[in-house]
Amino acid sequence: MAVTQGVEYAKLEDGVAKEYVDDNPVKGTSSGRPNMQAMVQWQYSCHHGHAASFVSTLLYGPVMDQGEAWCRAGEVLREKHATREDGQETVVLVCGSEDTVVPIDHVREDLDRYLGKGNCMAETVPGGHGFPLAQGEAIVDSLSVAWRL
């Protein structure tokens, strides 16, 4: 292990090591944006319980098979939406345009199925699954347009 500014880094393979050390996942890249690949590698290399914790979330957390709960949420949303004209009862889900973990097509399909068309919308901003770290302004812009702020 090497220590850089109080953060431990595991020694990685040559191709990744330079990017990993040069782009400190805690401080971000020279552009100021976090290096997601380096951050994920850091989690797996330095936090030995990360993988088990992630798998446990998928196995035991309320992540999968929540259709019934989402249908109930859709009923509440439809009731509220019927009384509002300003669009502020609309659920807006923002996704990364290149997200392969949660693809936008699946999100739109699930939103329409569970919450009902007209009560929700899915927008995209540039990026993959870690888009919130680098696309704060784009997210706010999407919400502002959707909610007519």
Image: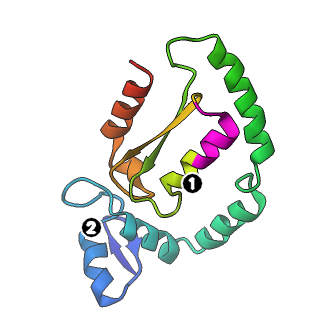
Q: Residue at x 56, y 49 (%)?
A: 107
* Amino acid identity at mark 2: Asp
Q: Against 86, is 65 above or below?
A: below
- Classify residue 113 as left or right of residue 104: right
Q: Against 77, is 123 above or below?
A: below
Q: Against 132, is 142 above or below?
A: above
Q: Which residue sits furthest right?
A: 68
**SS label for mark 1:** helix
Question: Residues under labels 2 and 1: Cα distance?
Answer: 32 Å
Q: Residue at x 37, y 85 (%)?
A: 12
Q: Which residue sits furthest bottom?
A: 14
**SS label for mark 2:** loop
Circle on res. 106: 1
Quarter-wise, where is residue 33 in the image?
Answer: bottom left
Between residue 112 and residue 148, name the one nearer to us.
112
- Classify residue 132 as left or right of residue 21: right
